[in-house]
Amino acid sequence: MMRTKKALRYDEQKIRDIEKAVSQFSQHLMSNSKWIRLIEAIIDNAHEFKKIQFKKIQNNRIGELYLNEDSIFEFDYWQRGFEGNNSLGDWLEYKEIEYLIFPKIVDSNNIQNLEEIKLIIEKVGQFYLEINEDELKLICYKE
């Protein structure tokens, strides 16, 4: 399928915006392969992960990732990011995510076991995690 020049310019501008935002951080704590291992663990343990939020590096908007046991990561683009699968409804590259938030309270009827989520994440590898009584945060970039 041919891409229009306008679409290509949009993609190039988006890449520049991401790279500019990324350059403000001194430490990059995640790689694409680490993301893939983490996502596979989340899908394999979907019953524990009821709500996952994320913050993009380019702005202060918080979105929600939609991953469950039926999520399939078999296409090439999963090596770099999510297509859809989030509340902001756009393509989302892993390198755009500043951090993930796993809130304890999902809604009035559901809570997440943050200690169990932490154990699942730690089985995947070393991650920079911050935890308090309200949420578990997985940090992808440090200033």
Image: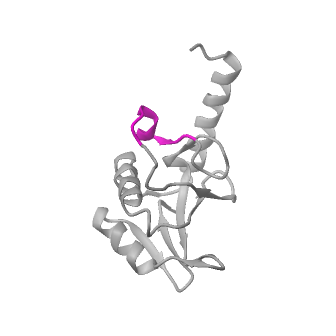
In the picture, measured across the screen, residue 57 lies left or right of residue 67, that is right
Name the one closer to the observer, 59 or 73.
Answer: 73
| Relative image position of residue 31 (x, y in whole percent) | 38, 49
**Residue extending furthest toward the bottom:** 133
Image vertical order of residue 5 relative to residue 31, above or below:
above
For the N terminus, the image quarter is top right
- Number of labels in the image equals 0
Q: How is the image coloured?
A: one colour
Q: Quadrant of residue 43?
A: bottom left
Name the residue at 42% across, 34% down: 75
Residue 121: image location, x then y, percent = 36, 67
Q: Is 42 rendered above or below residue 17?
A: below
Q: Is residue 123 magenta?
A: no
Quick check: 127 left or right of 109? left
Residue 77 magenta: yes
Quick one: 85 or 32, which is closer to the camera?
85
Q: From what the image shows, is residue 117 above or below residue 28?
A: below
- Magenta-tinted stretch: 73-83
Q: Is residue 125 visible?
A: no
